[in-house]
Amino acid sequence: MKKVLLITAMAVSILSCQKAAEVKEVKTAYVDTSELMKEYTEAKDLEAKYKAQSEEKGRQLEAEINRFKQDAASFQSQAQANGQEWAQKKGAELQKREQQLGYAQQALSQQLQQESGAEMDTLVTGVKKFIKEYGKKNGYAYIYGTGDAASVLYAEEKFDITKTIIKELNDKYASKEKKEEKVEEKKETEVKK
């Protein structure tokens, strides 16, 4: 009986050792999301696009604000000459205009935030999808994100694949732009014929 127990115990220990040996290493990596968004060409282009729109629309609004300031300055010099009734009427008009300019500034800011936010959400969704596909293709069990919204407190630098992801995303974006340019050239050629 002792021999049977001893043989069973040895068999169990041998099997458990074999199962432990079967455990494979889990492949993990991380991406610095802050660095990714700073270096990703499409994100840079998106930021530049909305900065240019903001400056363009801001110049238009700034011109209107400057006209208002000139009108307000001339109002003060003309108020005494044209009487109190005129001053009250013109003052009310200027106050209404000032309020409208404030609303216009606020509406412009909100519009640009909504538009850029929607495009940035689409970009982030695309980046996440790309990283997921990259992870599957390259055999990663986990790819963590670090940066502003850090989910990894420490990782060895050898597991950092940020530069690889940036390069592949930029290459993909560049090839997408080239395809769009070829489509545009083809359309222009067809229109000329």
Image: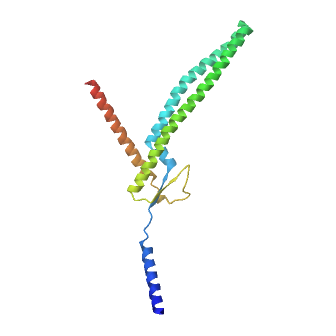
**On-image quarter of the C terminus:** top left
Please name the residue shown 66% across and 17% down the image: 94
* Residue plotted at (45% across, 81% down): 12
Q: Up-down: is 190 above or below 164?
A: above
On screen, residue 164 above or below 53: below
Give the camera-side residue of 67 and 87.
87
How far from the left and from the top, in percent, is residue 49? 47, 34
| In-front residue for pair 64/125 | 125
On the rendered structure, is 78 left or right of 133?
right
Give coordinates of residue 30: x percent, y percent: 48, 55
Which residue appears at 40% of the width and 48% of the height? 167
Residue 52 placement (x, y as % from top left) = 49, 31
Q: Is residue 149 above or below residue 13?
A: above
Q: Is residue 175 left or right of residue 65?
A: left
| Snapshot quadrant of residue 11 | bottom left
Is 92 on the left-hand or right-hand side of 36?
A: right
Residue 145 picture location, percent across and down: 51, 53
Furthest residue in direction front, as rendered: 1
